[in-house]
Image (cartoon, rainbow, N blue to C red):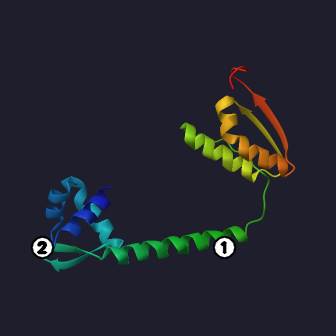
Amino acid sequence: MYEARVYVEKLKQVHPLTAYEIGKLSGVPRSKVYEVVDNLRRKQTIVQIEDHPKKYLPVDPEEVFSNIKKSFITSVNFVRDELDHLEKGEAIDYVFNIFGKETIIDRAREMVRSAKSSILIAVDHDMLKALEADLKKAEQRGLELYIVFYGDKKRR
């Protein structure tokens, strides 16, 4: 968060600033600002243009975003290549800790849509209603559905 605050503050300024001045303007604590400025310099989002005292200017945001995108794509491609060389291991059962009703519904939808042979699900009325269309499609794909319903039976 501090890096973003420093970078945005540097974009607002038209002249070079020292780390101390950047810290004062951005509200980043003095104890952190020098470390933050060094990190941004290493990440090539700001450049040092003077030595005594050290003063900094921001790199153009389009160049920064382009570099971030290139780095991300390179990392994704590396991981993808490494995954291609991995041997398939034993299937692992996962436990998910998910918070928030919408997040839970979204994850349940993803799981229903990606199921291959069967679905065992325990739902209340609201969750069943939210997943109804996806469960029908799963059934049409030939999946076996096992639904444990809990809650008020009379609710419609």
Tell which of 136 and 44 is nearer to you: 136
Does residue 93 show up?
Answer: no
Does residue 103 show up?
Answer: yes
Tell which of 117 and 27 is nearer to you: 117
Amino acid type shown at disc 2: Pro
- Classify mark 1: helix, strand or loop: helix
Left or right: residue 17 compared with residue 46: left
Residue 41 picture location, percent across and down: 30, 72
Residue found at x 17% / y 69% = 13
Residue 140 picture location, percent across and down: 84, 50
- Within 10 angstroms of label 1, few (less than 14), some, or many (20 or more) residues? few
Amino acid type shown at disc 1: Asp
Task: Point out the frontmost of discs 2 and 1.
Answer: 1
Tell which of 49 and 73 is nearer to you: 73
Relative to 50, say whether 107 is above or below: above
Q: Quadrant of residue 93?
A: top right
Question: Which residue position is annotated with label 1?
Answer: 81
Q: Are marks 2 and 1 in contact (CB under 8 Å)?
A: no
Residue found at x 34% / y 72% = 42
- Classify mark 2: helix, strand or loop: loop
Relative to 80, say whether 131 is above or below: above
The numbered mark, 2 or 1, whose residue comes first in the sequence reads: 2
Question: Which residue position is annotated with label 2?
Answer: 53
Q: Residue furthest front?
A: 156
Give the quadrant of the N terminus.
bottom left
Residue found at x 68% / y 36% = 129
Residue found at x 58% / y 69% = 76
Q: Quadrant of residue 133?
A: top right
Residue 20 picture location, percent across and down: 15, 62
Left or right: residue 84 compared with residue 17: right
Relative to 36, say whether 116 is above or below: above
- Mark carried by residue 134: none
